[in-house]
Amino acid sequence: MAPYISILSFLVILASIQGICAVDYTVTNTARNTPGGIRFDKEIGSEYSRQTLVSATNFIFGIFQQNNVADRKNVQKVSLFIDDRDGVAYTSNNEIHVSARYINGYSGNVKNEITGVLYHEMTHVWQWNGNGQAPGGLIEGIADFVRLKAGYVPGHWVKPGQGDKWDQGYDVTARFLDYCNSLKNGFVAELNKKMRTGYSANYFVDLLGKSVDMLWRDYKAKYGN
Ligand SMILES: [Zn+2]
């Protein structure tokens, strides 16, 4: 009886440790009967999507250099929904919503495209936002920087050096952050760490010794723009 009890208590302890560390992921296709929902089930699938949420999370912890649980946002559950709605995708309260209409209308490798979208949206779950003070363009740029580093760049993205302002967002800001990261490996991780409690444009000076406007000029000059 005694060995049985100790094995049982070991399992209980193990389960509670995993309960502390593990994130729960769910995938729900609420658009099952629409063309996009049918295409999702056929060409992407719930199990692949769930695995992608797990892989994206591990990848993001790597990019953000968050090796300890204490460095990460405290999130227990992430839910993905495929919904019959317009747009591409959005994330709110650790819920990722992807448009079934977008899936239906996408021409090309839709599995690859949605994988990239999930890396972007999952970044929103885990990134710090400067307590709400960081520019929206920077938040979106970091999400696309993760997508870039994961190797899911879509064909419609701008090329390096293109764009009008550093905080234009999305691909433009992602390319710029990639340049900044090339000046100092781990720059984006450090920037995200600083954004845990607030935001200041001076973070660029702190980390790279130049103002963000000067960095943007250097970046444009490097590509002859
Ligand atoms: Zn976004």
Image (cartoon, helix red, strand yellow):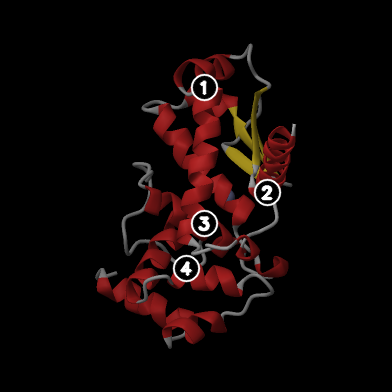
Would residue 94 appear left or right of 55 to someone viewing this image?
right
Q: Secondary structure at mark 2?
A: helix
How far apart are the alpha carbons under marks 1 and 3? 25 Å
Quadrant position of the C terminus in the picture: bottom left
Q: Which mark is residue 205?
A: none
Image coordinates for residue 26, horizontal then vertical, percent: 65, 32
Query: Do residues under tags 1 and 3 come within 8 Å of each other at their CB atoms?
Result: no
Q: Is residue 83 visible?
A: no
How far apart are the alpha carbons under marks 4 and 2? 30 Å
Give the residue number, with chain letter if any, for mark 4. Answer: 188
Would residue 174 appear left or right of 131 to someone viewing this image?
left
Task: Tell me the crowding category of disc 2: few under 14, some 14 to 19, or many 20 or more residues within 10 angstroms, Cα based.
Answer: few
Q: Is residue 71 visible?
A: yes
Sequence order check, earlier mark of 3 and 4: 3
Give the residue number, with chain letter if any, for mark 1. Answer: 45
Give the residue number, with chain letter if any, for mark 3. Answer: 61
Sequence order check, earlier mark of 4 and 2: 2
Q: Secondary structure at mark 1?
A: loop
Give the residue number, with chain letter if any, for mark 2. Answer: 17
Query: Do residues under tags 4 and 1 come within 8 Å of each other at their CB atoms?
Result: no
How far apart are the alpha carbons under marks 4 and 1? 32 Å
Mark 4 residue CB less than 8 A from any atom of ligand 1:
no
